[in-house]
Image: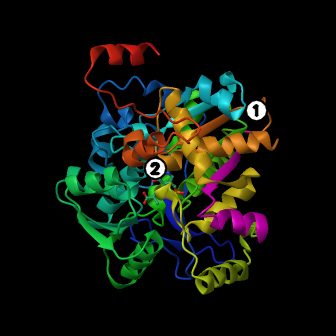
Amino acid sequence: MTTESWLQCINPSCGKKYSVNEPRTNCDCGELLDVKYKGEFPTSLKETFSERLNHHQNIFNESGVWRFRELLNFAGVDTENYDDYSKKLVSLDGAEGRTKPFHLTRVADYVGLKSANFWLQFEGDNPTGSFKDNGMASAFTHARIVGAKKVVCASTGNTSSSAAAFAANELDMQAVILVGEGKIAKGKLAQSLAYGAKVLQVKGDFDVAMAMVQALSKQSDIYIVNSLNCFRLEGQKTMMFRILDYLRWKVPDWIVFPGGNLGNTSAFGKAFMELYEYGWIKKKPRMAVIVAEGAPTLSNMYNEHGLRWNNGNIDNSIIDDYYAEVERKGIKAKTRASAIEILKPVNLKKAIRTLEFTDGVVTTVTDEKILDAMAMVSKNGFGCEPASAATVAGTKKLVAQGVIKEDASVVGIATGHILKDTSAIVDYHFNPKNKFANTPIVVEPDVNQILKLANS
Ligand code: F0G
């Protein structure tokens, strides 16, 4: 089965098309681009996807990204011909995207939902410990199509870890990563160094590093693997496909996840727009995007300034005025959830489109609530990094507000692994004032004292 694909400007009044063989991130008019498809998408593929779980050592069936290859076939492969697709699709040997939703009884109770109706999908179980591996598989596949040997990204740490790992595994590729100096968690910095990326610590935060990457894109043909690159978003759609596959294509009422650069918000919305268009689903899930109180751009623009997609007729003055004010007041993003410490999300417009299509909501959560939620996920025997816990804190808030009804079915995405930011966890538990602190006890090497404490 092959598919035709092209790039197209997201602004319907422009709609300019480009070849998928071009390494471009934006339309000539400056707007973002989508990958578009034309082909046959029979519902019988649902069965095929499910059967591929029995992968028979075919790494492209093992991969939770390429298992769904018919729905992101921008490489134009013959999806049933191993000799063809195995030469073109990039994978960490089938390891990416092998995730599924889990029930977490204690967390369900904490957020106020029924355990049977609540799941968390741990994207931290990806090979580099975050959801980014979904998108890097597709971005690197496209990088290969255009013959790139060097990739670049700005990052709060997970994109960079993933890009560095994929580049290392491809043998003939190099990753150059830009991170805000002192702005990324140690676990993530360690990964990028270990995988052999060229690490540039930019004096500034993520927004500054991202602006550098955008400026670079205008001056060189270095290949960008940030979510500005619409091929990355294609891989990230598969997080939604795995949820639906696991739930036997019964669409949940809500999908909840954290927002940073808004790549996921864009990709998840696109996944459902396409499935809806293909007639695979009749119901749209509502999306809840959770942002940190200290990085509230999407919430402010959507909830307070009334920014709407409006069939592509976005009122750009709302965005321009907002950023002008941010600039004038010298406001910077600030949150302990460093992964989402972003004030100028590059995918803002696509995210707004998702919110319209899914009748979505955006809400903010405080760092205190994020860290309590992170502790609660671990009290259930699972774990995630702070940004991911925004999902849980946000769900709890929306249930308490009655936005998410108590009997709703909800799937949350936990985006990054517990070991990404261990200092956030240790700091939390060493402070006995924190709600779920499990503070260690210092004890003399005295067996009786230890026994007394063990039994207390
Ligand atoms: N959760 C984690 C763990 C992340 O690393 C990110 C983004 C997000 C949520 C937000 O996702 O950007 O799609 O809205 N991290 C990027 C990075 C920015 O550079 O690693 P988004």
Residue 283 shows up from this direction: no
The answer to whether marks 1 and 2 mark residues whose Cβ atoms lie closer than 8 Å is no
Q: Residue at x 36, y 26 (%)?
A: 55
**Magenta highlight range:** 282-306
Q: Secondary structure at mark 1?
A: loop
Q: Is residue 305 shown above or below 196? A: below
> According to the image, label 1 marks what residue?
408
Q: Disc 1 residue type?
A: Ala
Q: Disc 2 residue type?
A: Gly
Q: Is residue 289 shown in magenta?
A: yes
Position of 196 with respect to 398 (left or right) is left
Q: Is residue 418 shown in magenta?
A: no
Report crowding for label 2: few under 14, some 14 to 19, many 20 or more residues within 10 A (C-alpha): many
> According to the image, label 2 marks what residue?
235
Q: Residue at x 75, y 67 (%)?
A: 308
Q: Position of residue 393 (x, y in %)?
A: 63, 44
Q: Is mark 1 within 8 Å of ligand 1?
A: no
Q: Position of residue 33 (x, y in %)?
A: 54, 68
